[in-house]
Amino acid sequence: MNKLNINHYVKVKLTDHGIECLRKNYDDLVANGMFPYGFKAPEVDGDGYSRFQMWSLMLQLGPYVRMCGTMPFEIDILIDIQEATNDN
């Protein structure tokens, strides 16, 4: 079995709801004077995936994951197995 370190990178396909969740998080930070620049959605690769460190994905979108709810990303998460096995 491979280990997944929360610092490893994963890829997810964000939904429209996920983009709105990220925008809401950003707007909350702006309201508290944290960021003076505009919202920028995460980059998307040619296959439609956005890359996050696992801890960052959990921090930013974990609170929006619900059973039978609108998901912020598709349910499959890609893990860089090469990166994960190199750490073992």
Image: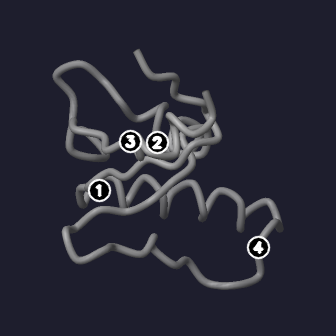
Number of numbered discs overlaid on the protein picture: 4
Circle 4 residues within 10 Å: few <14, some 14–19, many ≥20: few
Mark 1: few/some/many CA within 10 Å (<14, 14-19, 20+): many
Instruction: Please tell me which residue is depicted at 51% across the width and 57% down the height of the picture.
Output: 24
The picture places residue 74, in percent across and down from the top left corner, at 20, 44
Confirm or deny contact between disc 4 and disc 2 (CB under 8 A).
no
- Give, as a three-letter code, the residue at label 1: Leu
Sequence-earlier tag: 1 or 3: 1
Q: Residue at 21% of width from left, 36% of height from top? A: 75
| Contact, mark 2 vs mark 3 (Cβ under 8 Å) | no
Q: Nearer the viewer, mark 3 or mark 4?
A: 3
- Residue for badge 4: 35
On screen, 18 above or below 67?
below
Element class at badge 4: loop
Residue 8 spot, x, y in % from top left:
57, 43
Residue under the image location 54 percent in, 40 percent down: 54
Question: Position of 11 compared to 85: left or right?
Answer: left
The quarter of the picture where the N terminus appears is top left
Tag in front: 1 or 3: 3
Q: Around disc 3, counting alpha carbons within 10 Å, would you say few (fewer than 14), some (14 to 19), or many (20 or more)?
A: some
Q: Which residue is mark 2?
A: 61
Horizontal side of residue 74 vs 62, given as left or right? left
Q: Is residue 33 above or below residue 6?
A: below
Q: CA distance from mark 3 to mark 4?
A: 30 Å
Badge 4 amino acid: Phe
Q: Which mark is residue 14?
A: 1
The residue identified by callout 3 is 79
Q: How many angstroms separate mark 4 from mark 2 (CA)?
A: 19 Å
**Earlier residue among tags 1 and 4:** 1
Amino acid at the residue labelled 3: Ile
Disc 2, SS: helix
**Secondary structure category for the residue under label 3:** strand
